[in-house]
Image: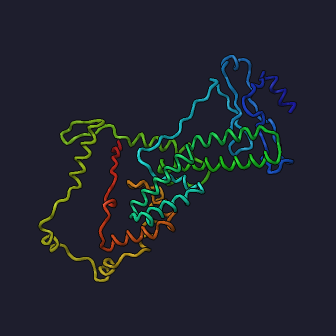
Amino acid sequence: MDKFKEALEVCGLDDLGFVGDPFTWRNHSHTADRYVKERLDRAVASESWRQRFPAFKVMNVDPRHSDHRPVIVDTHGGVGRRKGPARGSLPRFEARWLEEEECRGIVENAWRKGVHLEGKRVAGAVKGVLGELVDWSRNVLGDLEKRICKIKKELELCRRTDISVQQVRREEMLRFKLSRLEDQKEIYWKQRAHVSWLKGGDRNTKFFHSFASERKRMNRVKRLRRDDGVVVEEEAMKEVATNYFTSLFTSSTCTRMNELLEHVEPRVTDAMNEMLCAQFTSKEVVEALDSIGDLKAPGLDGMHSLFYKKFWDIVGEKVTEEVLSVLNGGPMPAEWNETCIVLIPKSQ
């Protein structure tokens, strides 16, 4: 330590001071008698550096999961304000809700109300469940960034109090809550990044945020070209897209189907035909659901397949009943035929 002090003196480096908690390291012991905190880390600089950056500011910031607080040196003396993620225009199931203990109870009550009390079909019941979840998230949970900020402030105040049994227990509890909220934040951005090849490991919230932002920028359609070659933008694009897909999905009746089939050589054997004509089973419904990615793009109901997988014990019986009814020749509910068409720019 003496050699280190001597080196600082020879180099003309002085302590720059700090803003925040003076203790930059703590052992996070679970007992008050063994809990230790010290100021081990600090920022130093020369006189010429201080003259070059007169507005500097040193901050001992949130340590997150480390024993040491990061020491941040801001040469401009200010910190930019972080903005929370923007909400989508259409409600959708948020995977991060699954981290909350109340989520299952809300789904179960809303589903029972829609199916058993109001007699709704699957589409109507799912819409009611999503509405209850969105209302719960907005009015009870609140904004995720604000919740994280609030917990961080409480944790910071706790860390600055004298060591006691209550202080150690409260700090441990707040750190656990903060960890759960940060997990939710990562899930939020992972859901929007649509990255399926990166799994587990440390948090990658910043990566998912950047990936989702870049993906949104690249997928934005700014102009479309009409059949006559004229390029249109903004509101005029709606008419071009509507006319194109209306024409594309308009069915036309074939008047010579029997004549056409006479020239097709049969390939299906009797055994194959028997299998193809067999009744669908509930097992096949579950297998089809399991084959869908958890966070693949949802339909207009806003529900990912993850919702059905997690709450299959609640919604599975009704969903299976309705699916088998349609597959085995019953009428198809009008909502099933609705879809959402998304334009994606061609890659250059």
State which quadrant residue 235 falls in: top left
Residue 102: percent from the left, percent from the top? Answer: 58, 56
State which quadrant residue 45 falls in: top right
Residue 208: percent from the left, percent from the top? Answer: 52, 45
Q: Nearer the viewer, residue 295 or 168?
A: 168
Residue 302: percent from the left, percent from the top? Answer: 42, 53
Quadrant position of the N terminus in the picture: top right
Q: Nearer the viewer, residue 97 or 182?
A: 97
In the displayed orientation, state which residue is furthest to the bottom. 270
Q: Residue at x 56, y 44 (%)?
A: 142
Residue 316: percent from the left, percent from the top? Answer: 46, 68
- The tally of labels here is 0
Location of residue 226 with respect to 132 vertically, above or below:
above
- Left or right: 265 with respect to 164? left
Quadrant position of the C terminus in the picture: top left
- Name the colour scheme: rainbow
Q: Residue at x 66, y 18 (%)?
A: 52
Q: Residue at x 49, y 64 (%)?
A: 309
- Left or right: 29 with respect to 318? right
Q: Residue at x 82, y 50 (%)?
A: 31
Location of residue 267 with respect to 22 vertically, above or below:
below
Location of residue 266 with respect to 236 vertically, above or below:
below
